[in-house]
Amino acid sequence: MSAMLCPHCGGTTHRSHTRGIKEKLFKSLTSHKTYRCRECGWRGWLRSADDQSFARRNKIRTIISVLITLVVTTLLALYLVDKLGTTPPSTPLNQQSTP
């Protein structure tokens, strides 16, 4: 893997740990990762050179989306079958049976 260069001074960077929930959420939703410059101390987000992790996350998101869609569609279909499958009573209320 090639070293990422600092956007401010052009020095070499190293990976930095995420801080807080906002950074962890941003990291999980994008292909950016936090880096820190060894020379000037800059810390920020750079797009990861590792596109395999992005492809893997994208595949996982797609699988989860399809599963959620299938569950919601199945539940909706079961609800509709239950509501439409019940028939109202066939005899009117004002009609009485004769003995």
Image (tube, rainbow, N blue to C red):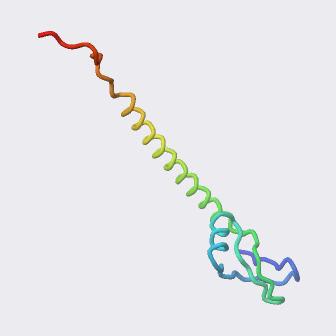
Asked if residue 93 is positioned above or below residue 64 in the image, the reply reads above
Quarter that holds the N terminus: bottom right
In the rendering, at what x and y percent does residue 5 appear?
Answer: 81, 78
In the rendering, at what x and y percent does residue 54 appear?
Answer: 65, 62
Asked if residue 19 is positioned above or below residue 63 in the image, the reply reads below
| Identity of the residue drawn at 82% across and 79% down | 6
In the rendering, at what x and y percent does residue 13 appear?
Answer: 77, 82
The quadrant where residue 98 appears: top left
Quarter that holds the C terminus: top left
The answer to whether residue 37 is left or right of residue 95 is right
Residue furthest left in the image? 99
Residue furthest right in the image? 9
The answer to whether residue 75 is left or right of residue 15 is left
In the rendering, at what x and y percent does residue 10 appear?
Answer: 87, 81
Asked if residue 79 is positioned above or below residue 65 in the image, the reply reads above
The quadrant where residue 91 appears: top left
| Identity of the residue drawn at 75% across and 74% down | 45
| Identity of the residue drawn at 28% across and 15% down | 94
